[in-house]
Image: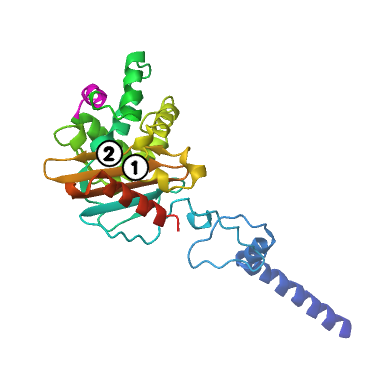
């Protein structure tokens, strides 16, 4: 009798165990154990989804905050100056920019736009003549106005500025009367510099050539930004400044420079009686403060 009772109990135990198997296989118990056994995939889970305790988070990807500051970087800027001045500094590695509260206010570019006129021509003319290359050199290095008018015509005049706005992602700028009167904000001038520096403006064949021309402008045209840089960085900095005393009785002095990892633009407008050096000093002051 005891043997029969024992056998009956064993049979009932086995039956109960088999009856429970479907519940175990159909639950998330095995899924959880399987997840815990898998190596980390590095793929983030959905919001609200819990991670298995043994899974390790993937290392964070490098971000802009992990990069060392560019030589010129966002910093407080204060200039005791009469008239209008604005600035924008852009990190060429990340595309992040910062600037004055009025950095979206457009002003006439004067000769600063010559860098774009050269880039626009070179991108659309893979094999320029020796004569035109010589004129480009004069336009950039010596800021020759006759050469600028020549390429303004070849580039289609205001059509060139339309391409500038579209290609470089400008938001405040537009063509006006002639090349020297093109209206560009400090924010857009920095974007234009970045567009020239990364090769979009002149194209892969001619970008290096154009930047080298801009690094070799005449010494009296390297005012403003370049003299305020550390000596070791000056030779590698590409420059195209603009300056004009207009009939409205005001000086317009604009500075644009493309460094290894930054672009800086500074626009100034002030009474003509103060002279060109006044605007040059504003550009230099902003440059110095952005190195702090």
Name the residue at 67% across, 64% down.
Answer: 36
Judge whether residue 271 can be spotted in this image. Answer: no
Part of the protein shown in magenta: 147-157
Q: Position of residue 78 (x, y in %)?
A: 32, 61
Determine whether, in the image, residue 154 is placed left or right of residue 95. Answer: left
Q: Quarter of the image containing the C terminus? A: bottom left
* Mark positioned earlier in the residue sequence (1 or 2): 2
Q: Position of residue 206 (x, y in %)?
A: 41, 25
Residue 229, above or below 175: below
Residue 42, above or below 128: below
Determine whether, in the image, residue 40 is placed left or right of residue 111. Answer: right
Q: Position of residue 79 (x, y in %)?
A: 30, 59
Q: Which residue bears the numbered disc 2?
A: 242
| Disc ID at residue 256 | 1
The answer for how far apart the CA atoms under marks 1 and 2 are is 8 Å
Helix, strand or loop at label 2? It is strand
Mark 1 and mark 2 in contact? Answer it, CB < 8 Å.
yes
Q: Residue furthest bottom?
A: 2
> What secondary structure characterizes most of the magenta part?
helix
Q: Position of residue 200 (x, y in %)?
A: 38, 33
Name the residue at 28% across, 60% down.
Answer: 80
The picture quadrant where one finds residue 191 is top left
Residue 156: in magenta span: yes
Name the residue at 60% across, 58% down.
Answer: 59
Judge whether residue 272 can be spotted in this image. Answer: yes
Which class describes the residues within 10 Å of circle 1: few (<14), some (14-19), or many (20+)?
Answer: many
Helix, strand or loop at label 1? It is strand
Along the line of sight, the residue nearer the viewer: 207 or 280: 280
């Amino acid at each position: 009798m005891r043997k029969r009772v024992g056998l009956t109990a064993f049979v009932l135990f086995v039956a109960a165990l088999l009856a429970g198997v479907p519940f175990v296989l159909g639950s998330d118990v095995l899924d959880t154990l399987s997840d815990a056994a898998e190596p980390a995939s590095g793929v983030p889970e959905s919001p609200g989804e819990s991670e298995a305790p043994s899974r390790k988070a993937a290392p964070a990807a490098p971000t802009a905050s992990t990069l060392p500051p560019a030589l010129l970087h966002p910093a407080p800027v204060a200039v005791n100056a009469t008239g209008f001045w604005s600035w924008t500094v852009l990190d060429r590695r990340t595309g992040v920019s910062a600037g004055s509260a009025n950095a979206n206010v457009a002003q006439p570019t004067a000769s600063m736009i010559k860098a774009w006129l050269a880039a626009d021509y070179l991108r659309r003319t893979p094999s320029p003549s020796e004569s035109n290359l010589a004129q480009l050199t004069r336009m950039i290095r010596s800021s020759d106005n006759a050469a600028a008018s020549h390429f303004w015509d070849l580039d289609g005049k205001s059509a060139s500025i339309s391409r500038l706005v579209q290609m470089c992602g400008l938001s405040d700028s537009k063509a006006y009367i002639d090349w020297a009167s093109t209206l560009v904000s400090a924010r857009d001038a920095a974007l234009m510099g970045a567009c020239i520096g990364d090769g979009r403006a002149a194209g892969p064949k001619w970008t290096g050539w154009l930047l080298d021309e801009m690094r070799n402008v005449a010494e009296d045209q390297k005012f403003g930004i370049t003299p305020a840089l550390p000596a070791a960085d000056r030779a590698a900095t590409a420059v195209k400044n603009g300056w004009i005393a207009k009939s409205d009785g005001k000086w317009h002095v604009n500075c644009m420079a493309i460094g290894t990892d930054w672009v800086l633009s500074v626009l100034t407008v002030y009474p003509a009686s103060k002279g060109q050096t006044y605007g040059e000093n504003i550009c230099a002051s902003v440059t110095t403060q952005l190195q702090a």
